[in-house]
Amino acid sequence: MKRLMVAAIAVLLPLGVAFAAGPYDGTWTGPLKGSGTHCPPGAITLRVADGRIAGNIQLSNGTVRLAGSVATDGSATASYNYVSNGTSGTVNGKFSGSQFTGRLDSQYQAAGTSCSRDISATRS
């Protein structure tokens, strides 16, 4: 009986660790606050799983996908490259509790300009 219990624990223990959710896992949504002609407001969705970020930036002229990572301390970075629109950008910020705060810095190569938007997202 003792051997059977030890064998069961040895088999099941790794499964529990493999499926444990990270502290930042989930879907985070919030507004992008910008101003000016080249920096309109929008929205962001970040989906976090196992330290990886996959998400979308929604602006008036379309939606762009971004990808990145989260460090164990909650620091995050993600980027996008919207080739057909001549735009690229980076998200830098920090997850803490149920809040993500950060900044989206975008470069508009075709227009020769850039902009920064503040991000405040919550886990849903």
Image (cartoon, helix red, strand yellow):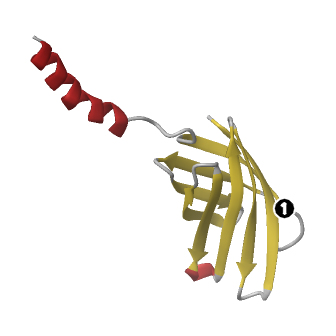
Question: Residue 109: image x %, image y %?
Answer: 71, 87
Where in the figure is residue 117, as x and y percent of width and height?
80, 62
Closer to the camera, 72 or 110? 72
- In the rendered image, the residue lying farthest to the front is 2
Q: Position of residue 100 (x, y in %)?
A: 71, 46
Q: Residue at x 10, y 11 (%)?
A: 1
Kindly tell me whether residue 65 is visible in this rendering.
yes
Tell me the quarter of the picture where residue 10 sits: top left
Question: What's the amino acid at mark 1?
Answer: Gly
Q: Is residue 31 above or below residue 109?
A: above
Please state if 82 lies on the left or on the right of 103 as rendered. Answer: left
Name the residue tied to disc 1.
Answer: 34
Asked whether residue 40 is in view, the answer is no
Residue 41 as seen in the image, left or right of residue 65 = right
The local secondary structure at tag 1 comes to: loop
Specify the farthest residue to the right: 36
Q: Does residue 104 appear left or right of residue 50 in this picture?
A: right
Task: Give the residue at x 58% y 54%.
Answer: 71
Q: Residue at x 68, y 35 (%)?
A: 98
Is 57 placed left or right of 4 in the picture?
A: right
Could you tell me residue 118's position as x and y percent? Answer: 81, 57
Vertical side of 118 occupied by 81: above or below: below
Q: Residue at x 57, y 42 (%)?
A: 24
Front-most of 65 and 13? 13
Q: Quadrant of the C terminus?
A: top right
> Is residue 113 depicted above or below 76 in this figure?
below
Where on the picture, by quarter, is residue 104? bottom right
